[in-house]
Image (cartoon, rainbow, N blue to C red):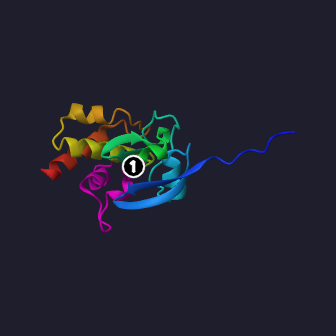
Amino acid sequence: MHAPASEPKKRLLRLRLNGRWREDAVGETQLLVDYLREVAHLTGTKTGCDGGECGACTVLVDGEAVPSCITLVARCEGRSVETIEALATQGRLSALQRAFHEKLGAQCGFCTPGMIMAAEALLRDNPAPTEDEIRTALAGNLCRCTGYVKIIEAVRTAVEAGS
């Protein structure tokens, strides 16, 4: 006889998601990307590689860019998590989002939320980065469409708009 499969343990999680505190029951092994997409219904964060290698799922945790596909949601207890949905205010795109649109920094768009969140973390920390600093900040984010030229241009445009 086989023992019945046990239900995964759940716990109550409290975190600040896109500026609002919320509490949810989450599995102890649930990944942040799955929590965002399936529990919070925020689908801007994409699942790419499931191994922290492509950057498509990048979000900010306490202002730091992290791959949500290898981050346990339980590790976000009491912390602030920001997704791509947090950047627009009252229906208006942020300067960085506008720059990606205007400079054609998104082609298929799959990597774009992760790219923008990684760039957002950089610009919050360093509002006037060099091109090398931009490239370094985006090194963990892969794009199969653009060759990165338009993405770098978009970030530089956002930097210029912010000054």
Q: Which quadrant of the figure contains the N terminus?
A: top right
Q: Answer whether residue 154 is magenta in the image.
A: no
Location of residue 89 in the rendering, given as x and y in whole percent from the top left corner: 29, 64
Q: Secondary structure at mark 1?
A: helix
Q: Residue at coordinates 30% horizontally, 38% vertically from top-left?
A: 149
Seen from this angle, which residue lies furthest left? Answer: 163
Q: Nearer the viewer, residue 126 or 150?
A: 126
Looking at the rendering, which quadrant does residue 118 occupy? top left
Location of residue 95 in the rendering, given as x and y in whole percent from the top left corner: 24, 55
Q: What amino acid type is highlighted by mark number 1? A: Pro
Q: Report crowding for label 1: few under 14, some 14 to 19, many 20 or more residues within 10 A (C-alpha).
A: many
Q: Residue at coordinates 31% horizontally, 57% vertically from top-left?
A: 87
Looking at the rendering, which quadrant does residue 114 occupy? top left
Query: Is residue 56 found left or right of 129 in the rendered image?
Result: right
Q: Residue at coordinates 31% horizontally, 61% vertically from top-left?
A: 88
Q: Nearer the viewer, residue 78 or 144?
A: 78
Q: Residue at coordinates 21% horizontally, 47% vertically from top-left?
A: 157
Location of residue 39 in the rendering, given as x and y in whole percent from the top left corner: 53, 57
Q: Nearer the viewer, residue 160 or 102?
A: 160
Q: Which residue is mark 1?
A: 113
Q: Answer whether residue 103 is magenta in the image.
A: yes
Seen from this angle, which residue lies furthest right? Answer: 1
**Total marks placed:** 1
User: Which range of residues does the magenta coloring cover?
Assistant: 77-105
Location of residue 138 in the rendering, given as x and y in whole percent from the top left corner: 32, 36
